[in-house]
Amino acid sequence: MLKNFYLTAIRNMLKHKSYFLINICGLAIGIASFIFIALYIINEMSYDKFHSQSKNIHRVHVKGQMMGQTMDMAVTATPMAQALISEYPEVSKVTRVKESGAWFIGRDNKKFNEDGVLFADSTFFDVFDFKFLSGNKKTALIHPRSVVLTASYAKKYFGNEDPIGQKLTVEQDSIFYTVTGVMEDVPDHSHIQFDMMGSLSTYPHWLNNQQWVSHNNYTYVVLHENANISALEDKLQALVYKYVGPQVEQYLGTTMDAWESAGNSFGYYLMPLEDIYLYSNVDEELEANSDISYIYIYSLIAIILLFIAIINFVNLATAQSSSRAKEVGIRKVVGSSKQRLIGQFIFESIVISSFATIVAGLLVFFLTPAFTQLIGKEIAYQLTSSLWSFFWLGCLAILIGVLAGFYPAFILAAYQPVDVLKGTMSAGAKASWMRNLLVVIQFTAAIIIIIGTVVVYNQIDFMLNKNLGFNKEQIVVIRRSDVLRNNLETFKNDLLQNPNIKEVANAMSLPGKDRYNNNAHMTEESPDSPYLLYENHVSFGYAELMNLELVEGRFFSKDHPSDSSGVIINESAVKTIGYTDPIGKKFLNPDDDGPGKPMTIIGVVKDYHIESLHKRIEPTMLRLMAGNWEGYVTVKLSNTHNVRETIQFIENTWFDHSYNKPFQYFFFDDDYANLYNSESTTGQVFVVFASLSIFIACLGLIGLVTYTAAIRKKEIGIRKVLGASTSTLIKLLSNEIVKLIVISTLIAWPLAYLATDYWLQNFADRLSISPWIYLGSTFIVVFIGSLAISFQTIKASRSNPVDSLRQD
């Protein structure tokens, strides 16, 4: 029986080649798109799951509220790790990871500023399963000044030599680290990314810090299998009263109970390792995370594309039913049952979907490099990674074949042989209402995807072009200003000798960078009530170079020696504290002995974004940098002419003052745009798949109009004989489709609004969606659909009416 089904299916496909090719093309594109997105989603969902203990690993987070400000951080106090392992039996292992900016690494003539340097406890490789290629992971980080390299960086510094036991200079040429291990490159699907891992024991002041109110380490714990996580989180509150409380009393002069009675709170919670990448939305992340909302969005796109392709199949199959009507009638006359016919047509559908799946698999195989370039990351799980992939592809082909063939099979099998053989049956009429419904669903999906694409691109454009409260144009940023040592001011002055350079300043951090400190500060009026303020240390001229807008007071000035203890705050800080006249008010800068020296507010600047537009503007403080700290030199160009020559001048001047340290720079506007890589990637993916959804929908339209024209061939011939023009025939055949697109529009608009509004909730600053986006998206579908309809209708209308009138 199956052999007969197969032969009949092949014969039918050869007989209707155009129908077969349109179906294969539409299904293959839909299936390939579905596979690509599925692989991407699997990759995103697989973050950190390659560790053998991943389900038991958690990261400790700090949560709380201070003077109405919410606190949620991924970093904890240094002594937290020891307290967890010694006081909580639920904890089997603990390790800390510390990030501390760029490090100057060298070997012989190879010297670079490296961003991918982390430090960790000796237990790091007991907790995390990064694969070692050489060295002993149990002992690699025990001794001070030990470093583990990834394979790429071992190659970078040592070539083909064995790096184990060899030395690297770190910062100073007289400081040597010993290479104790080489490991495989960190997988892309790890939220901890590094190129070098140094021993935390190298710096005793990091290890011996007993400040429970200072947070600067990522603390990871491995819990026992039977640990009750919720109960453990409740028990962690004991740490607050035991260790945090006394230090709060030391600094604020109030008890923990009184502090909490004032509406403040402080505590800890555990974030599962496998949830960090998609669910953690805190500051101070090791790497930029994604968001679970993108998984929902991509899943919806995958389902929509596959659904559109299946709808094409159903529409074409039901539209083609007229050409199979006599076959059905004859089969029934000679004794074929309805169930057997249904089986035959579903089998044919499975054969077509199997062909399409094979084509889709080939497309995925050959286009994977282009797709990884589109999304900007390697996919951990690929189609050829496992034999199970082919099993699931086979299941997908069968499922699509059954879904796509089920309804057409029942339509075809339901034909009555008497009506068919007498010629009294209206071909395809029984299925017309279903076809119309499916066309509506198809174009509803296409319109939603187009609206989503336009909204994403408009939001990205809004973010990149919004007035951020500072100027990021024509600014060259040089890294590691601290390596200039005492030559910093001379370097800045020498740069100003170039007429193409307008201003020069330096700062510990810049908007979009994560080196802003989030510190608690008390006001002179309320020394027992701390406020959380983001803090940046800057040089004279920084505010002017960044074009910050002064609301009141003044900027830092060399004419005022007292500015060494002055601060500039933003409007959000003024609002948070409740000042009506902030100039002259004082903050207290806490130190180890309690509230320290006062800092006077000398100016207030208009709010500006120190982070991306995903987050609201936080209370911020600028302080004058005392000396030369690690950070950035910002160079404002006076014009965009001779940029290459100006950069060369800056580089030459740098080497005159930097003790031969590497010169690394970037353009501020380009670097700031990197904050929206996820959105840019989403926009590009939307464009690709929106185009594919329209293409697939138009394939269906071409097929549908072709068969509609075939069904109405005699009518077209009669109308042409009676004098109907081509434009009249186009209007006749396209009216129904245009009506369906209008209905699709009415359904798509509210659904698209709900979907885009959900996505835009990820942004503190978001655009207002213009009605023109909705109108334009519908116009695109109508225009492209009309082209497809017109092409087929013109072809039908230009045929010889004599041929159609001779049709039986």
Image (cartoon, grey):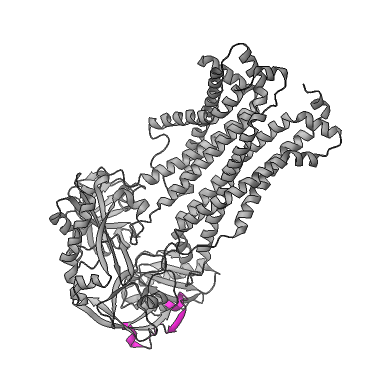
Judged from this view, the residue extending furthest toward the left is 86
Judged from this view, the residue extending furthest toward the top is 334
Front-most of residues 218 and 452: 452
Count the labels in the image.
0
Front-most of residues 358 and 165: 358
Give x and y (percent) for residue 208. 16, 65
> Would residue 459 be found to the left or right of residue 103 on screen?
right
Front-most of residues 628 and 432: 432
> Can you say whether 554 is above or below 780 in the image?
below
> Can you say whether 266 is above or below 107 in the image?
below
Residue 367 lies in magenta, yes or no?
no
Quarter of the image with the C terminus is: top right
**Quick check: can you spot residue 782?**
yes
> Would residue 783 be found to the left or right of residue 509 on screen?
right
Residues drawn in magenta: 543-565
What residue is shown at x 66% (from left), y 51% (from top)? 779
Front-most of residues 245 and 626: 245
Give x and y (percent) for residue 451. 57, 52
**Quick check: can you spot residue 130?**
no
Give x and y (percent) for residue 414. 60, 23
> Would residue 458 be found to the left or right of residue 214 on screen?
right
Q: Where on the picture, by quarter, is residue 515?
A: bottom left
Give x and y (percent) for residue 405. 55, 28
Residue 547 lies in magenta, yes or no?
yes
